[in-house]
Image (cartoon, rainbow, N blue to C red):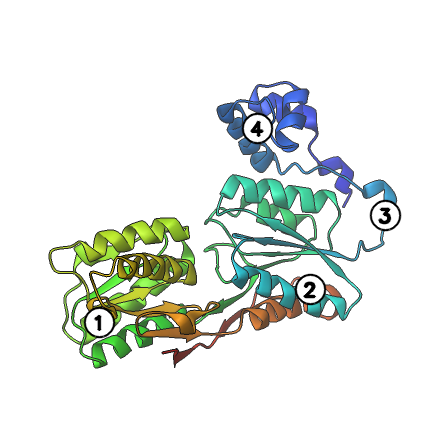
Amino acid sequence: MNERAHRPTVKEVAQRAGVSPMTVSRTLSGGVNVKPEVQQRVLAAVAELGYHRNENARSIRPGHSSGLIGVAITNIANPYYSTFALGVEEEAALTGRRILLGNTSEDAAREAELVGDFLGRRVDGLIVVPASATSTHLAHSQSQGVPVVLASRRIEGLAADSVVLADEDGAFRGTTALIDRGHTRIGYLGNALSIFTGRRRHAGFVRALEARGLPVDAHLVATNQQTVEQARDATRALLRAKNPPTAIFCANNRNAIGALKEISTQLGSGLRTPGDFPEIVSFDDFELAELSPVPISVIDHDPRELGRTAARLLLDRLDGGDRDAPSREIELPVSLRDVR
């Protein structure tokens, strides 16, 4: 196939978006002096046409590998994802490859632009923690002969290798453990239910309550917390409820840290004791969890191994496997561990 004949141009993107080629270039270089609504039109046109900048094609001879793997994660500030990226890098290094790492901040448009940049640098393959259910840019990557592996989350309808965690089972086990300790009013802190992991972990939480005949109290369920500060605010609201929870299930470590920050702040007032606050279960371990002022357990797993597994799936496609073989799905187990 003649790839050049199928590669859209800046001019075509500009025509689709109704802007000038210069505006397209400015948008793809960071959006300086470009109105947000115009940037969105340009990025939509980029995704629709499958455009990507060819940053280093001249330095790579036809038929030769760049030796690069593009890795897109959702939150580079979260140590969980830096550890995940380390696992990818270690496995890639065994074959002499290096990684290009980018952050999407859970933004689908930013992810599409990042993937386009990776393709412009002629990466051998992509490992992506999807920011949304949007898959057009990833399907385009596959059509260009660049294999894609999804990590931590899957996208329905995209035939790509994936490695995820036992999200629902872990949430079920963590919530059940709280019920076994006598808790009947259990709060929930998590990210958006539209996110693959958020949906699965919430489902495990609900299933555990229903299995023991306990109601799901909507007043004790808080979703859409993407940051520590949002989780802290949500915790404050839960603790102010008329009948506050005696335990809280946190669907990720950002929510757990936010909950503990709020609890520690209220303890600092000297008006309450640790026994006045809910016990915590966190899906994902985090640093200094053992210093929690309240009892805490974690649903544990190794993000480094998650990264290694994703890299092995990709490298198998690149170096040994059939690129056209059916997609594979791997679910890694988790364990429940009491921290204090």
Front in this rendered view, residue 71 or 244? 244
Residue labelled with disc 3 = 60
Report if residue 193 is visible in the image: no
Q: Amino acid at mark 3?
A: Ile
> In terms of image quadrants, where is residue 268?
bottom left
Task: Decide which of tag 2 and tag 3 comes sooner along the chain.
Answer: 3
Task: Decide which of tag 2 and tag 1 comes sooner along the chain.
Answer: 2
Q: Amino acid at mark 1?
A: Gly
Question: Position of 325 compared to 282: left or right?
Answer: right
Question: Position of 179 compared to 30: left or right?
Answer: left
Task: Look at discs 2 and 3 and give the one toward the viewer.
Answer: 2
Q: Amino acid at mark 2?
A: Glu
Alpha carbon separation for disc pair 4 and 1: 54 Å
Residue visible at 68% across and 42% down in the picture: 117
Residue labelled with disc 2 = 89
Task: Look at discs 2 and 4 and give the one toward the viewer.
Answer: 2
Alpha carbon separation for disc pair 2 and 4: 32 Å
Percent of width and height locating residue 143: 65, 49
Outermost residue toward the front in this view: 270
Q: Is residue 259 above or below residue 13?
A: below
> Which label belongs to residue 275?
1
Alpha carbon separation for disc pair 3 and 4: 28 Å
